[in-house]
Amino acid sequence: MNVSTNVPSSGHAEPLAQRLAELRGPAPQRSLNARSLAALAANPGCHRRAVLDAAGVDKSALAARLGRPAPFGQSPFAIARGVIFESRLKADDYAALLEPLRAHLGVPADGGAPVQVPDLLPRSGPAVRADRTVEALARAAADPDAWTLLDHPMLRLDVAGGTAYLEPDAVVVHGGRCTVVEIKSFPVLDGGADPAKVGAAARQAAVYVLALQQAAAALAGRPLAADPYTEQRLPGSPRSSVLLVCPKDFGNRPTAVAVDVRRELATTRRQLGRMTGIGRLLEELPAGADFDLAADQNGVPARSTEELAASVEAVPAAYGPDCLSTCELGFHCRAQARCGDRVEQLGRGVRGELGSIRTVTQALAAATTEAVTAAVTTDAEAGPDEAAERLAYAAALRAEALGRIPVAGRA
């Protein structure tokens, strides 16, 4: 899904945009897209990613400069497979795509009301395409009896004082409301799909739903509902359930699954709200910190690797093992977590369970203390030799966890 350059808004957002531009330096701004916004929603507590994405920093280039480049991004085979699958769905006047739309949305069969597919000017610039999409959405929503398919519409989304342009696969409009249709190439096997891939698709679709909510609110001249779980039934407003269209089993025949994205939508709105208030995070940066990746005429970088690393370290991260597949800085943050002996390297679930315990060493010490306490409390029932054996075994467990010695089997 493509995104054009984030366009800064005018007025009060200009100082913030200027500060973000200073952090980025003269390097080109990397624009946000639905995948990057969905990744933000997947890890809403990461200040580091919020600052870097708001500033438009090229995180892949930054990771390479820090010495830990990540093999990040979609497989070219997966991209090609997705393009082929979508083209087959939309061939012959969308014949294959209309089949699951009829089953799940009630699109009329052949001979019924025709499905209208307006021209959204696909070869024009993103701003022109976005204006045409708003016009087509308004016309379609004004006729509740008509069925309209918006093929690759261009949507606007306000992000951190700027405008991002997003391009979903399709949007179906009927009855004054619309439904986001996401086309994915991963299969649905026996009625189920990979939960991780479905979750990623739901987070991505939630970004489109939010953009459509903003568009419908703007058309109606009303503010967006404060509660993200509230559906504003405005003309052209989206439903909170999106339609995920995938290959059935291992063939090319499509099947569809309705996915409720209210939870992902609420998380996305909270994260974008944090980015709108990104100034609070910028105030915590030390003087002179920036992420300038540019080089002079002789190819000498403006900032040394040590200076870039210090700037990155100044922004707190919320690392988790899943960051390796969703963020370009995942390998760098993992190395930092390991060097700092942080419990985050074990996963966010473990981090949450351990509470105030922040390092693996502290966790092992706490576990050893529990083992010693249990051994002492049963000392009255056990002989001195058995109590000593339990204490020795607890110490050996701790040593093994620290990678010092192997644990001998108990007799």
Image (cartoon, rainbow, N blue to C red):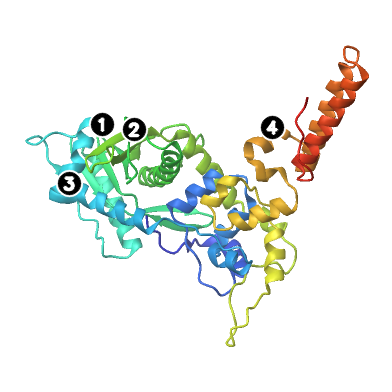
Q: Nearer the viewer, mark 4 or mark 2?
A: 4
Amino acid type for the residue under numbered disc 1 = His
Earlier sequence position, callout 1 versus callout 4: 1
Dot 1 and dot 2 residues touching (CB under 8 Å): yes
Amino acid type for the residue under numbered disc 3 = Tyr
Earlier sequence position, callout 1 versus callout 2: 1
Q: Is residue 301 above or below residue 372?
A: below
Secondary structure under badge 3? helix
Mark 1 to mark 4: distance in Å? 41 Å
Q: Residues within 10 Å of mark 2 (few under 14, many from 20)?
A: some
Q: Residues within 10 Å of mark 4 (few under 14, many from 20)?
A: few
Q: Nearer the viewer, mark 4 or mark 3?
A: 4
Secondary structure under badge 1? helix
Mark 3 to mark 2: distance in Å? 19 Å
Residue placed under numbered mark 2 in the picture: 258
Mark 4 to mark 3: distance in Å? 49 Å
